[in-house]
Structures are given as structure tokens and as C-alpha cells.
Amino acid sequence: MRERCGNIIMDNAEAKKTPLYGEHIKMGAKIVSFAGFFMPLYYKSIIEEHLNVRSNSGIFDISHMGEITIKGKDASSFLDYVFTADVSKIGRGEIVYSLILNEKGGIIDDVTVFKFSESEYMSVVNAANTQKDFSWLHHMQGEFQKKGKDVSVENISDSVGLLSVQGPKSRDLIYPLISEAVKIGKCGLFDFSFEPKQIRDLKHFEFSCANFKGNGIEALISRSGYTGEFGFEIFVPADKTAALWNFLLKNYNLSNLLPVGLGARDTLRFEAALPLYGHELDETINPYDAGLEKYLSESKDFVGKESLKHVKNKEKRLIFFKLSGKQIPRHSQRILDENLKPIGCIASGTYSPSNKFPIGSAYISDAGVNPSFLKNFFIDIRGNFEKAEVVSPPFHKKR
Amino acid sequence: MNKDGLFYFSKSHEWIGKDSNSNKYRIGISDFAQSELGDVVYVFLPESGKTYRKDEKIGEIESVKSVSEIYSPADIKIISINSNLNDTPELINHDPFGAGYIAEVEPLNPADLNILMDDNSYRIFIVSHHE
């Protein structure tokens, strides 16, 4: 047996370790190198971990992700110019999803932005892009400073551990383990200049400060995730990450909690049709191609906006499909029309544990093709032409 | 994983061995191989009646995350395939030396099996190559 192609981007460069690397090894995780980090692919089984997140709860180490702070009197106008969404319009304690574009309108990264105040924000970025994003933001910071503006960006990724607790029962784990009291001021690595909400009152894309009972760990907690389920993400000081991970896992019986690796993180996000940079998104793809135009603000100027005016006619189109056969489509395979003419490339392909059949996404190279006419098309899976059918995501049942 | 009788292993992690019940030869992939693959979701099986040379590709195994090719551990003729794998490919994960076998085969030159690794040599091979 020899591995021919995988779906996770492997790299052989010197990989970093998250604060939980030792815990993953102790638990017998299968380790892969992903985005420059040694990460758990799975602990026991991707399928079992996936299904447990859909029905109970799972905990993920996502400390590989990057955190960049943007501070200063002009931080709001900086973010509004460098990011595509209306970042400054959100309230304190709120989060917004945004793209960062290059001058040509290509996608540098897809990120979230957390607002602490008009002059204090944090952006959470894809692990593989942390260095690239930081260099870009640092370059833009220089441009702003030349104009006498007050903004400074800082890459704080190495000091932040990030845990994600996802699944319909995740509230049954988190609520009993945090104290009710909330306060203005210091919260682990962060400083809250506003009164944070009660954790139970958080809506999707809001954040607060969690004080864990019994161990005194303080951490920023947000109602967010990458699975299509109810869940939380917890930003904890790097040196306290292992203690918090073990504390939550010790209380696994509150929510049937299982540790979950990157393998199930990918199948979960894909069933929910959430894009993954490097698959659905890269610098050759513009937001219209990817169907992300709703994250482009119409009420302000931003980097890449001018170029996008010229590409409003879509050059590509992202479609989602399922297969009737059993072979799994993989990134970069060709898709063919009913006359076996190549019409595009697979962005993501995987096995859907919730549906027990293969699913995928693809870019059709001619945006003029109407997906509803794509009744019969084929995926070239190593020379086998597997029949596929266009479907509307998500692929999992929304609660 | 329990297995009776003598099993021979290839460097590409396939096994060939005599099933103690039927006294016939079977091939499959090793426990180490299945644990490296993770959840198996599809197996493309070899053709019944066909003859394959040693190291020739005889099939494919897809796990959630990857595709791997299966190579013939010896010169063999396929007597019958394990068609249970069509509906329950996870048998490879649960019982790689038993119910998760790939096919029943006839070695063309049984004496050639001796050039493969026995259990002990294979264990040492895994440790020295993968840890």
C-alpha cells in the first residue's frame, strides 16, 4: 500500500507544536503536519468523532490558528479599509466574518474580527496564512502610519491557546463549569473595556469572558465554530491551555465529550458548506466566484473593491454535489459534463459521515453554466467516471 | 488482533497467510496499515480469476482522508474476493486478519513466500521505518 493523495495539505517543513501536543501524544492521536503544525488528525476514528459532534459534543485543539490584534485611535478606519466587511459597525463583544483581498480582488484570507472597542480589535486567521496575513497587515499599517494615522498590528498567535467545543450538548459542558459573575477588566490575555455578557446570554458571533470554576482559569469565550453546530471557542493563555483541555475532558460525562481531530473538523465544516482556505478559497479566486459577495460592504471603500468592479461577471462558479457511487472525490480532480468535456475542478471532496455517501464542491470554469442543467455530470476519479448530482448545501440536518 | 497460522508480510503492508479453518490462502492488509489509514469507506477489489505478479497493483482502499493502492504480496491467482467489503468496508479496520481479508488466493509459487517477512521481522520493520 502506498498513499497517493490526501485531502489535508501536508507539508514537511519544520512543524511547530501547539501547547497541547504532549496531550495529543498521550492520548494516542494520529499526528499529521498541517499548516506548519503537528496536529491530531484523529484520536480513534474520524467518523465516530464527527458523529459525536453532531449528536453530543466534541473538543478540538485549534491553537494552530492565528490571532492578530489591531489597536490604535484609527484601528476602526484601518479595518474598514483592509477588510471587506463593515467591521467597525459591529458592537463591542461582537464578531464579524470578513475577507481580506489583495489589490486584484483575490482572496488573501477569510477571517473573523472581534471588537473590544473602537480602538481595539482581534482578527482570527487561518493557520496556513498567519504569516502572510500579518505581513500584509503590517505593510498596510505602514501605509496608514505614513499618513499620520495611529494603528498598530501585532501577531499574538504564539501566546494564545485556542479550544473549540462544538455540538448540541456543548452548553451542558460549558454552563455548569463557569462562574456566573462577569466583570470589566482583565480576562486572561485580554482586557475588556466593556461589561461582558453572561455566557448563557451570548448569541452566535458574540463573545464574553469565562471564569472556569475550581481552577481560576480566565479565558475569552465566543459563540462560534466551524462545524455547523452550536458551540464555543475559548481563547486561553498558551501556558494554561493544557490545564483547561484536561479540566474539560475530565468533565466529559456532562456532554458525552470526545476529543476531535482535524479529520472530523474538515468533514464537519464541509457538510456545513463552510469554505476552507486552500480548497474553496485562494488568491486566484474572487468573492463572486466563491459565492461570498454578501461579505463585501457596499457602503465603504476597501482594498480590492475597484478591481472587483471589473469581474462582476462571474468567471467561475462554486457548486456542491453528491455522488451515487462509493469512491471519494478529492481536491484537484476534474469534473466532466455528460459529453465528458472537462468543465471544472474539485475544490473539496470527502466522505459524509452523516449521510454515508461521498460529497464534494467544485469550481465550474464557465459561470454561464446553469447548475440546474448539470443533471448528469461526472468526476474523473483516477480514470473512473463517477456520476454526480448537484445539491444545495448544507449536507447535515440543521437543528 | 488474533490470527492463527503463519502470515507473511510485504514491505507495502499487505499480508498473505493460510486460513486455519479453510486451509486456503488469503491476502489482506496489516493491522498497522489499517490503523494508519483510519476509517475505511471504500475498497476497490481485485478481479476474481485474475493472476497478479508480486507488487502489481490489485486494488485501492479509500479512507475518509486518503486513497491507498493495494499491491499483491506475491505472484497469485485470485480465487474469490471478499464481497462483504462492498457493504461493510470497515471490516478492514475491525478485523484486518480475519473478516476484513481482501481475497482468497492461490500462490503460484508457495516457496516464494519465504522471501516475505514473518510476523517478527514485520514488527521490527514497522518500528524501524515508522517510529
Image (tube, coloured by chain):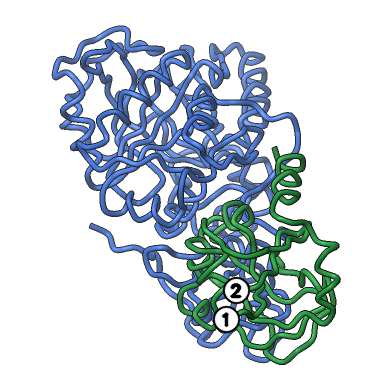
Chain colours: A blue, B green
User: On the image, numbered disc 2 is attached to which residue?
Assistant: B19
Is the residue A46 above or below the residue A87 in the image? below
Q: Name the residue: 60% across, 26% down.
A: A17
Residue B112, horizontal then vertical, whole percent:
85, 70
Q: Which one is in front, A36 or B17?
A: B17
- Report the amino acid beneath label 1: Ser
**Mark 1 touches mark 2? (CB < 8 Å):** yes
Against A80, residue A255 (above or below) is below
Tell me which chain the residue with mark 1 is part of.
Answer: B
Pick the quarter of the image with the N terminus of chain A.
bottom right
Q: In screen coordinates, is A309 left or right of A271? A: right
The quarter of the displayed image where residue A399 is located: bottom left
From the viewer's perspective, is A47 left or right of A168? right
Q: Nearer the viewer, residue A95 or A263?
A: A263
User: Is A315 situated left or right of A159 in this image?
Assistant: right
Q: Is residue A3 above or below residue A236?
A: below
Closer to the camera in the image, A189 or A291: A189
> Do the residues at discs 1 and 2 belong to one chain?
yes
**According to the image, label 1 marks what residue?**
B22
Q: Is residue A344 visible?
A: no
- Assign a secondary structure to mark 2: loop
The chain that hosts pointer 2 is: B
Residue B69, quarter of picture:
bottom right
Name the residue nearer the viewer: A244 or A334: A244
Examine the rendering and report whether any part of residue B80 can be seen.
Answer: yes
> Label for residue A75?
none
Residue A163 image point, x, y percent: 40, 30
Q: Position of residue B24 (x, y in %)?
A: 64, 80
Decide: few, some or many residues near mark 1? Use Cα within 10 Å; few <14, some 14-19, many ≥20.
Answer: few
Q: Amino acid at mark 2?
A: Asp
